[in-house]
Amino acid sequence: MICRMFPILLSSVRSADVARQIRDASFPFVVAGCPFALIAKHEAQALTNHGQTLERLAERGGLSAAEAVAVLEDRAYRLMPEGEAHIRLAGLIIGPAIMAAFQAGAAP
């Protein structure tokens, strides 16, 4: 099964300062995408925060990790360190997947 992904902007990750923030947060990777089915449940917040649909945002390259966290948490966007944003975004993506595995009996 192929999962459609919503893009997470990585252009800022190339800067030395952002790479240092991610490393200093003890986070070994960055989030490059979010399952579209997960973020689609928060379409209204994306419209509130960005005035565009998720489809249009995806066409334009996606959202930053901090912007995606705000949408997934159904709240207004606020600045946060890049490392923190990727850690929180990963938790928001992985948490539901783990819960679904437990409910399906696939996890111990």
Image (cartoon, grey):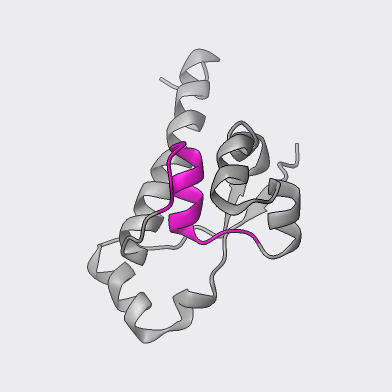
Relative placement, left or right, of 82 versus 26 is: right
Q: Position of residue 82 (x, y in %)?
A: 36, 65
Kindly identify the residue that appears in the image at 75 percent across and 54 percent down. 56
Magenta stretch encompasses residue 13: no
Q: Is residue 91 above or below residue 106?
A: below
Name the quadrant of the C terminus: top left
Q: Position of residue 73 (x, y in %)?
A: 43, 38
Relative placement, left or right, of 15 versus 17 is: right
Q: Is residue 61 above or below residue 91?
A: below
Closer to us: 81 or 35: 81
Q: Quadrant of residue 57?
A: bottom right
Q: Which residues are magenta?
A: 62-77
Kindly identify the residue that appears in the image at 57 percent across and 66 percent down. 9
Q: Is residue 75 above or below residue 60?
A: above
Q: Quadrant of residue 10?
A: bottom right
Relative placement, left or right, of 107 versus 82 is: right
Relative placement, left or right, of 24 versus 9 is: left
Kindly identify the residue that appears in the image at 43 percent across and 40 percent down. 75
Closer to us: 36 or 2: 36
Q: Position of residue 41 (x, y in %)?
A: 61, 31
Kindly identify the residue that appears in the image at 29 percent across and 77 percent down. 20
Magenta stretch encompasses residue 71: yes
Which residue sits furthest bottom? Answer: 16
Q: Position of residue 38 (x, y in %)?
A: 59, 35
